[in-house]
């Protein structure tokens, strides 16, 4: 189930002539409007609040059991820095818990159990949580277009299509007069797969200098939920322990690796000449992209005089909300001439923190987390570059539990 999106983005516009905009059937530049609204909010309220707590009641109706009536329960939303938590207690239907803890996006579903999200599901959940706490719309969408006018529960709204980095279109309904988000239509991941979800917002309350919807309805093919906030708080301290990973999620992150290989060590490495391809790709397509890049580079190197000087690697230069600046290739003994795609580059030398990951590739982020935690504990300064080296060929060793990956993090 989607978390309870709290749209703060569309609060009173201020400098924009709302009367003039309301008279238009379509906004000619809705992206500029959204930017101006964010700027007005930031100047008045100091940007995204560090913490936010919302608690209240919920009513859960299973549409396949109409005679049963709604089941009453409770819910809570908590945001603090890069950590988020949403709980919905649907009583006899179980408790749904979802969270973001740094790079880890997870959920405990009463039907499907514990899971760590990746790909599109991870992207969708990060977007939902980010918008809920008021992060900029451009962090999650590449474009916005007003496609018409619709009435949402008695309010005349601009219908705005926003495109995500993965290509999905989500529709926001922005009040022509009040410039509040009265609804969203989107596709999100539920226990029944990827579904159309209809969100509607009403009953606004000012808290922490921002407007928050006290009431939200969520409707899919199978369920109808009404969330009603009793408490919206941007001032109270939220205990850090609230965001601790559940034991079942932590167990999924644990690879049961031997102590001598989970240790983080500081080592010196030499600068390494490589043949590589660098591209900006969707996070959900990293594995697929590596499956194309590495054979392409390997084929080029073996046909040249460069000479293979080590196992394949990948390097992540930067991450966006749904994309990554990825480089992957092969260490070489001699520089290459290269092609339009394959270039001669280097992996940095000097002092690095190093650890090993044994297991499936989708759990490699745990190794980076291990290094990051170790650096903070030992007051080691981040040097920027991070890369990983794949010592096991999955074509020769099909068991993911035996795959060995060496992870490097440049330090100062």
Image (cartoon, rainbow, N blue to C red):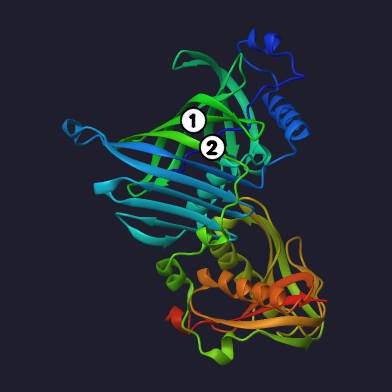
Residue 91 vs 65, above or below: the answer is below
Task: Look at mark 2 in the image and give the residue it sits on.
Answer: 232
- Label 2 neighbour load within 10 Å: few <14, some 14-19, many 20+: some
Total number of numbered discs in the rendering: 2
Label number found at residue 214: 1
**Residue 165 in picture, x, y percent from top left:** 61, 44
Left or right, residue 343 beside residue 290: right
In x, y percent, where is residue 354? 68, 82
Residue 375 in view here: yes
Does residue 18 appear left or right of residue 361 in this picture? right
On-image quarter of the C terminus: bottom right
Task: Residue lying at the far bottom in this picture: please name it.
Answer: 260
Q: Residue at x 73, y 34 (%)?
A: 45
The alpha-carbon separation of the residues under discs 1 and 2 comes to 8 Å
Q: Is residue 375 above or below residue 90?
A: below
Q: Secondary structure at mark 2?
A: strand
In the rendered structure, the answer to whether residue 61 lies left or right of residue 205 reads left
Q: Closer to the camera, 80 or 131?
A: 80
The residue at the point 67 percent across, 24 percent down is 30
Picture residue at 58% right of the left edge, 44% below the top: 52
Q: Quadrant of the N terminus?
A: top left
- Asked if marks 1 and 2 touch (Cβ < 8 Å), the reply is yes
Q: Secondary structure at mark 1?
A: strand
Q: Residue at x 34, y 51 (%)?
A: 95
Tell me if 350 is positioned left or right of 104 in this view. right
Q: Position of residue 203 (x, y in %)?
A: 49, 23
112 lies above or below 152: below
Crowd band around label 1 with a 10 angstrom C-alpha radius: few (<14), some (14–19), many (20+) = many
């Amino acid at each position: 189930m989607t978390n309870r999106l709290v749209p703060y983005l569309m609060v009173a516009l201020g400098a924009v002539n709302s009367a003039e905009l309301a008279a238009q059937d379509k906004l000619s530049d809705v992206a500029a409007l959204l930017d101006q609204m964010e700027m007005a909010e930031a100047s008045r309220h100091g940007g995204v609040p560090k913490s936010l707590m919302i608690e209240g009641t919920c009513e859960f109706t299973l549409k396949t059991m109409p005679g049963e009536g709604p089941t009453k329960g409770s819910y809570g939303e908590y945001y603090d820095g890069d950590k988020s938590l949403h709980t919905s207690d649907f009583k006899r239907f179980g408790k749904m818990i979802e969270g973001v803890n740094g790079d880890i996006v997870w959920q405990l579903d009463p039907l499907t159990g514990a899971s760590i999200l990746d790909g599109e599901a991870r992207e969708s959940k990060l977007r939902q949580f980010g918008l809920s706490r008021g992060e900029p719309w451009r962090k999650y969408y590449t474009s916005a277009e007003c496609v018409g006018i619709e009435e949402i529960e008695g309010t005349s709204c601009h219908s705005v299509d926003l495109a995500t980095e993965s290509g999905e279109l989500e529709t926001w309904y922005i009040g022509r007069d009040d410039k509040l988000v009265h609804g969203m239509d989107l596709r999100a991941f539920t226990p029944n797969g990827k579904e159309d979800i209809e969100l509607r917002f009403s009953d606004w309350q000012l808290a922490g200098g921002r407007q928050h919807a006290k009431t939200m309805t969520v409707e899919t093919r199978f369920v109808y939920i009404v969330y009603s906030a009793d408490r919206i708080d941007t001032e109270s301290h939220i205990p850090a322990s609230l965001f601790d990973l559940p034991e079942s999620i932590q167990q999924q992150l644990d690879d049961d690796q031997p102590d001598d290989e989970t240790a983080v060590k500081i080592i010196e490495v030499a600068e390494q000449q490589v043949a590589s391809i660098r591209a900006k790709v969707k996070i959900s397509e990293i594995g697929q992209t590596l499956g194309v890049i590495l054979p392409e580079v390997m084929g080029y190197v073996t046909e040249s005089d460069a000479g293979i000087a080590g196992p394949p690697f990948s390097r992540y230069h930067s991450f966006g909300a749904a994309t990554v600046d990825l480089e992957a290739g092969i260490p070489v003994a001699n520089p290459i001439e290269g092609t339009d795609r394959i270039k001669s580059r280097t992996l940095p030398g000097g002092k690095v923190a190093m650890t090993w990951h044994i297991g499936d590739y989708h759990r490699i982020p745990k190794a980076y987390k291990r290094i990051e935690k170790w650096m903070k504990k030992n007051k080691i300064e981040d040097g920027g570059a991070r890369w990983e080296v794949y010592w096991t060929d999955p074509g020769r060793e099909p068991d993911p539990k035996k795959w060995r990956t060496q992870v490097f993090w440049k330090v100062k």
